[in-house]
Image (spheres, grey):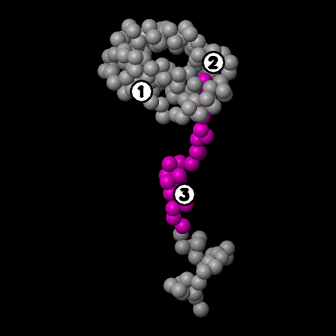
Amino acid sequence: MSEFTREQLLIQFKRMPEETKEAITSFENAQAIKEISDKNNLHVDQMGELAEEVGLILLGLTKIYILPSRLTRALNIDRNQTNQIITDLNDKLFSKLQHILKTINTTARPATPMNTKSVFDQKLSGLFTTTKDSGPNNPNYQTPNKIDPYLELPE
């Protein structure tokens, strides 16, 4: 099952050039995936997972260098079988689409915008404020509308 929603996949598909759209939906590529699946004795559900992983690469949503680990996990197979499938994919599919893959990996953007803040900044943004920034000594400080019985105002 994909970590991307159907809407994200459609948005990314619409962003692709016509040549890439044709490559993703071509009968020849579907036939190549079926042949690779048959050669490597994959079940129907595994063939679907393989097609999905290849589609995500062609859409530019995942990078090709992480394909071996994703296939091993998604298909629940050992590394030797994964390597054989990768070799078959390279021979029958990716070599024919090499120019498309280069374009996708250099120009495609994910379907969702990336946040440029570091993870640390994302986690801590808005969680804490210091007393010097939020207290009554700050010239931009506005007193709350409610009277706080526990707030001691300086005299």
Q: CA distance from mark 3 to mark 2?
A: 39 Å
- The reply to whether residue 68 is visible in this rendering is no
The percent coordinates of residue 150 (x first, y second) are 51, 85
Quadrant into which the C terminus falls = bottom right
Q: Which mark is residue 115?
A: none
What's the residue type where badge 2 is placed?
A: Thr
Are dots 3 and 2 in contact, CB under 8 Å? no
Q: Relative to 16, does residue 8 appear above or below in the rendering?
A: below
Residue of label 2: 20
Decide which of tag 3 and tag 1 comes sooner along the chain. 1
Q: Position of residue 151 (x, y in %)?
A: 53, 84
Amino acid, disc 3: Ser
Is residue 118 shown in magenta?
yes
Looking at the rendered structure, the secondary structure element under dot 1 is helix
Residue at left offset 34%, top offset 24% = 76
Asked if the stretch drawn in magenta spans residue 1, the answer is no
The kind of residue on which mark 1 rests is Arg
- Compare residues 147 and 92 and report the one nearer the observer: 147
Question: Would residue 103 be found to the left or right of residue 121 on screen?
Answer: right
Classify residue 69 by image quadrant.
top left
In the rendered image, the vertical position of residue 28 relative to residue 9, given as above or below: above
**Image position of 99 (left or right of 123):** right
Pointer 3 residue: 125
The secondary structure type at the circle numbered 2 is: helix
Which residue is pictured at 48% across the width and 34% down the height? 3
Tell us which disc is closer to us: 3 or 2.
2
Disc 3 and disc 1: Cα gap in Å? 32 Å
Mark nearer the N terminus (3 vs 2): 2
Label of residue 70 in the image: 1
